[in-house]
Amino acid sequence: METRLGRRALLTAGATLGVGALVAGCTSNSTDQTPSGNAAAPAGDNASPGRTVTIGFSAPAADHGWIGAITTNAKAQAKLYPDIRLNAVEGTNDVNQQISAVQSLIDQKVDVLVILPFDGKALTGIAQKAMAAGIPVINLDRIFETALAYRTWVGGDNYGMGVSAGTFIARRLKAAGKTSPVILEIAGIDNLQLTQDRSRGFKDALAANGLSLTDRQAADFTAAKGQEVAANLLQAHSKVDALWNHDDDQGIGVEAAIKQAGRDKEFFMVGGAGSRRVMDQIKADNGVVKATVLYSPSMSSSAISLARLIGQGRGMGDLVEKEVPTTVTTYSAVVTKDNVDRYLPVGFA
């Protein structure tokens, strides 16, 4: 068990506090301030210091709690290793600016790159250029168009999120004796593959339990749109039994609409991603949200740890293989009142 836990600590490391402003330039371990995100301490054979590795890091602008946590976590994780120098460039949602930023990291001849692209398709070319230059690329979350553009992909399980949410809702409704429940879904951005995968998993899980989705709308991952969409759905359905909202930041607006309608005691809601705000509500058991499905930004902490190992030519301590795997997919656990204490450290602000 200790060995399994040790590896899990590496793969699902860390979490975050706050959506800090992104800072351009080098973040080395010789600096004095530690970012506010949580991180997993080095453990086992992989904790042994190796040669110093310079890791270049690029992500979108921190205009969303989850994205902000990605950068905070990466910086916090790098601080834990004396043999990492992290060069984090300023986040941007302009694909051309992000391409230029990655090019600057290539020109600086960093040892490994960790890239969360604003648009995986648009950043594929520059990632391939880095790989061609002999710089291994860790592709974080939004996948590039071709596997030739990355050494290792680290991300969440969007289909699994939907399955976890649907399974939890089905079991809770069955336990309550609901035979023909009204089930609603508020998705993110419909033209994104991740949203389509989440919705497909949700629908499949409900069907596997003999249930079906009553109604669904997308809210573009914003609180304002979440409030608007939730108000529309509540107006359209005089009775609701359960609701899955894909994203906890978007959920701020969804919850506001439910409360404004005076229907926060009528049904239960399941969130998505795993924010600290929602976890606190789940623990207090004083709101409409009774669970959230993880899609944790702790994956950036894991990406930094894996980039270090790749840069040092090492594998993962308790795996037989001598190299870091090609893909790492995080698990979409369901956080409830019964287990929330375990997951609070990875809740993001």
Image (tube, grey):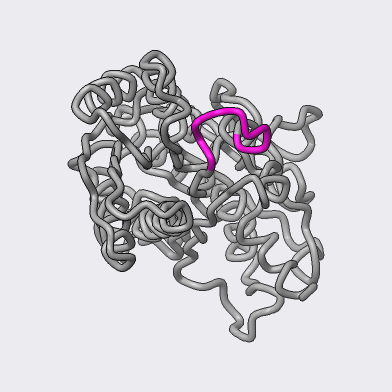
**Image coordinates for residue 224, horizontal then vertical, percent:** 33, 17
**Numbered label tally:** 0
Answer left or right for 136 relative to 303.
Answer: left
Task: Judge whether residue 283 is colored magenta.
Answer: yes
Question: Which quadrant: the C terminus?
Answer: top right
Kindly identify the residue that appears in the image at 70 percent across and 78 percent down.
318
Would you say residue 138 is visible in this rendering?
no
**Image coordinates for residue 143, horizontal then vertical, percent:** 33, 54
In depth, the one of 229 and 126 nearer the eye is 229
Q: Is residue 249 above or below residue 331?
A: above
Question: Which quadrant: the N terminus?
Answer: bottom right
Task: Judge whether residue 291 is colored magenta.
Answer: no
In depth, the one of 8 and 309 nearer the eye is 8
Would you say residue 330 is visible in this rendering?
yes
What are the residue bounds of the magenta stretch?
282-290
Kindly identify the residue that appears in the image at 68 percent across and 42 percent down.
344
